[in-house]
Structure formats: structure tokens, C-alpha cells
Image (cartoon, coloured by chain):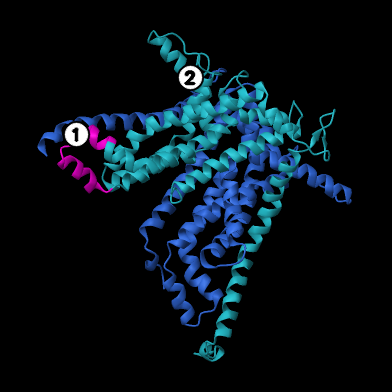
Amino acid sequence: MTTIARPRNLGSRLLGLQAALVYAFFYLPILVLVIFSFSDDRLVGRWGGFTLGWYEAFWNDQELTDSLWVSLQVAASSTVISVVLGTLAAFSLERFRFRGQRVFDALLYLPIIIPDVTMGIMMLIFFSEGIDLLDSVGIEASKGIGTVTLSHIAFNISFVSVVVRARLSGMDTNLEEAAMDLYATRWQTFWRVTFPQILPGIIGGALLAITLSLDDVVVTQFSAGPGATTLPVRVFSLIRKGVTPIINAVSVVMLVASLLLVVVSLIVGGLRSSSTPVANDD
Amino acid sequence: MTAVEEHPVVEATPEFEALAARQERRRGALYALPAYLYLVVFFAIPFLIVVVYSFATRTRTGGVELGGWNLDSYQRLGEEIVRDVLVRSVVLAIVTTLICLVIAYPFAYFITTRSPAVRNVMLALVMIPFWTNFLVRNYAWRLILANEGPLSNTTDAVGLGPTEILFTQSAVVLGMVYAFLPFMVLPLYASIERIDTSLIEASRDLYGNARQTFTSVIFPLSLPGVVAGSILVFVPSAGAYVTPAILGGNKNVLLGSYIVDQFGNARNFPFGASLSVVLMVLMLTATLAYFRSGGRNL
């Protein structure tokens, strides 16, 4: 045993070094971006002294702030709807057996695995055909915030249901049965027993939905019409036109928003794993 | 106590149980219904429309004629330009996957050797970039690799000369490795962590050296994680659109942008639709392989 201790230590030291390099690889680019967002130089990657000017420029840019507002609206409404639908779907799949369940289960997985580009194309054709169809029966419709929200719900339902299902399947069903045995109605059982226990899962699903909605470029670009440009889509088209330091500032704002969401979800996730299902109130 | 009176005890006859079971099924279907309908209308139908489009004809003006169904769009997949795009995308995705595997394996292994508390912190530090805005993570590299950017200036200062990899395939691979590395680390960690340590001890007791222990015990047992991670990296890499658009040049078109172009400048909807179907089939095959390999509980 003692003879292999030494090479193992050397190996483990090398592994430790490699791990440090991987973390540097993960975090240095983000750090560099943050640093250069404060650089007073018209070239994106050159240091020219400290300034908050690019943030101010972002704040004063009507197009960018409008896009930010669109993004927030889409994220909020698509999250609320997909949390309700996704939680119900998770509940039906984990707690019941019904006809068509396997098809539903498969259908629910597809939006997760489908490539962005394919889903974008699907939405592009679907909404233009759908709007033509509505036009032909005399209903006026156009692409806009509504269509973007509809497409975000389509992928968010699946992610929410996966997260909530994970929580439901790890839950002790004895408590629900006990409540029913004690003549609690289904409604009472759900709100007093099931809901408090799956709440971390629902919050986790909601945070994931917000993150994905604020993250999406491709699907949004294809479902959006004029006046419904979200911040990532705006930034993406700016990058393709040619980068300017204002993009650095916008990126850092988006970065901070997503980091806040991760921190909250890690905290909720921590609660999820540390509190045993039985240890809940009542 | 009043509740008891409201619920008279019912004898559990077979008929009653059948009725109750039917009610249960109906209730389950009722909960599923809103999401089910939503996904049928806003996912399944759009998908079927794309499939239908892929058999349609392109009109001279770039419109779509629904009728005169044909396989022309699929036959075009054999053309040399198209084949080049497909091969290039798949090769780039494979290269990305292999690089991720080489980086992630020792890293994931190292995490499993730490104490549980340290492990959780290390995994959380992998999750954070994974959740961070995808566009921003790609853009960060655009900035780093820029002409006279931080990387170029650094290599120039140490005497290596300026780096010029922006708008090349290397930059695209770098961006994808950066973006998808967590997809490789997490399943690898899960599968290595699951290995029974007594097997590793047994190998050592039988005088297996570190390399033998690795090649004949640890690696074979971690294969499910290798397969799962590889698929999780390969799938988004093969269909990538945002990363090549930001870090790649105009030459060497990849599948994602090629598809998008069919709905933009090229205006060939049926052909674009057939390419989307091909991409979808590629992904479905990979995903089925993933579930077959037992990757369900990622």
C-alpha cells in the first residue's frame, strides 16, 4: 500500500493542476469581458483607462432598453404560463396512468432535444402559415411579442416539467395517502401536503424557464416580427454587424442577470437536497 | 368529524374499483391536457408542417408550392456543396466532442477524489458557467480573440507574435468546447462517482499498477458517462448556429447557418425544411442511443 502512495500523490497533484486550469478556462473569459466593459477605448479588446461610459451609453440607447423591456415581458409571461402547464404535466405523468401517456411523455421530451435551428424554422413557418390562415378568415394577426412568448412557452413547458417531475418522484407518497386516509379532499391534499413539498422544484423550474427565455436567440429571431426584438437578438445582430464596446456593457448586464439566477437556483437547490421530504411543516 | 359523515364508507366491489380506476385515468388525462394540447398546436403541428414543406416545390420567385410532392430537396443532399457542409459540420462536432472528453475526463475524475463538501463546491462552479447566458459566453471569446485584443496582445508581448484565429474553424471549435464542456463534465462525474471503490482496491491488491487499474477497471466502468457526455456535446455542436456566426468566418459554412440561409438569402424553403428534418433525425438517433446507454438519470 505504501509503495503506491507516492505516485498517486504526484498524479493527484497533476490532476489538481489540470482542474485549476479548467476553472481558469471557465472563468477567465468572463472576467476579461467584465474588465473590458470598463475600458475607455473604442476598440472592444483594448484597455484605455476606466470608464462607466459604455453602461451609460447602454442606458441611453432607446433600441437597447426597449429590447431589454421586451425580453423581460416575454420571460415573465412565458415563465408563468409554462410553470402552470409544466407542473400539471409533471403531476399527471408522475401520479397517474392514462391513455396516451407514453406519447405525451415523448412529446414533452422533444422540445428539449430539438436543435435550436430546427425549432426556429418550425416557428417561422408555423406562424407565417398561421397568420395567413387567420387573415383568410378575417382575423388580423401579426408576429410580435405574442408569437415570441408562444414559442418560448413551447420549449419551457418541457424544462419545467422535467424539474418538477424530479422533485415529485423523490417525494414520499405516504404523506399524500395519509392525508387522503384522513379524509382530506384532493384539493386540500394538494395545497397542504404536495405543494409545499414540490415548491422548491417549481421554483427551480421557474428559474430555469426565466434563464432559458432570457438566453434564447435562434427561436426568438424566427418567431419575432418588427417591434419584438429581445435583448439577446438585438445583441446578436449588433455583434454580426461589427462589435462596439457598448456590447461589452450589455453583455455584462446580461451576465450579471444570469449569475443572479444561478445563485438563487443553487440556493433553492441546496434547500431541495438538504431538507428531507418528511421534515416539512405539519 | 363532519368530514366523516360526508364520506360514507363504500364497499369495495369490483365495479366500484373499476369506476375509481377509470376516474383516476380521467383525472390524469385532465391534468395533462393543457400542456398536451399546447405542445400539439405549438410543437407537433409546426414540426409536421416542416416535414410537409420538405416534400414541396420551390417556385421561381422563391415561394413554396404546396403540391406536386417530390423528393427533390432530399436528392440535393447528395450534391457536393451540401455534402461538404454536412461532413464539415459533423467533423467539427466530433473534434469538439473529443477535445471536451480529453479535458473533462481527468477533471471529472479529480472531482470524485475530493471530499463531499469540496465536490459540491467544485460541481457548483461547473454549473455556473453552464447556466450563464450562452450568447455572452460566445461573445467573450470574440473579444478575447479580437485583433489587437487581449490574447493577441499577450502572445505578441511574450514574443510569439499576434494570434489570428478569430473567424477560423479553430475559433469555432474553441467557442463550442467552452460552451459545451459542462455537458461532458457532469455525466462523466456521475458515472465515475458511481464506480464501486472496492473494485479499484481489488485491482491494486492484485498488483495492478495505476495505468492497468485505469484501463481495465475505471475507464470501462465509466463508459456510460463517456457515451452520455459525448452525445450531449455532439448534438448541440452539430447543429450550432450562434457560435459559428460569432466566431467563424464567412467561408466554411456549417449546417446551422446553411439551413438558416435557405430561409433568408437563398429562399429555398423546401430545401431548408429537408435539411432541418435531416438534422432532427440525426439528433433523435443520438438521443435514442443516449437513452439506450442508460443515460436517463443524468
Examine the structure image and report whether residue B203 is included in the region drawn in magenta: yes
Q: Which residues are magenta?
A: B196-215
At horizontal 53% and vertical 75% (from top left) the residue drawn is A188
Marks 2, 1 in one chain: no
Q: Position of residue A43 (x, y in %)?
A: 55, 17
Q: Colour of chain A?
A: blue
Chain shown cyan: that is B
Chief secondary structure of the magenta portion: helix
Residue B14: image quadrant is: bottom right
At horizontal 52% and vertical 70% (from top left) the residue drawn is A191
**Which residue type carries mark 1?**
Asn
Q: Nearer the viewer, residue B277 or B71?
A: B71
Residue A229 visible within the image: no
**Disc number at residue A49?**
2
Total numbered labels placed on residues in the image: 2
Q: Residues within 10 Å of mark 1 (few under 14, many from 20)?
A: few
Asked if A186 appears above or below B48 in the picture, the reply is below
**Disc number at residue B209?**
1
**Disc number at residue A1?**
none
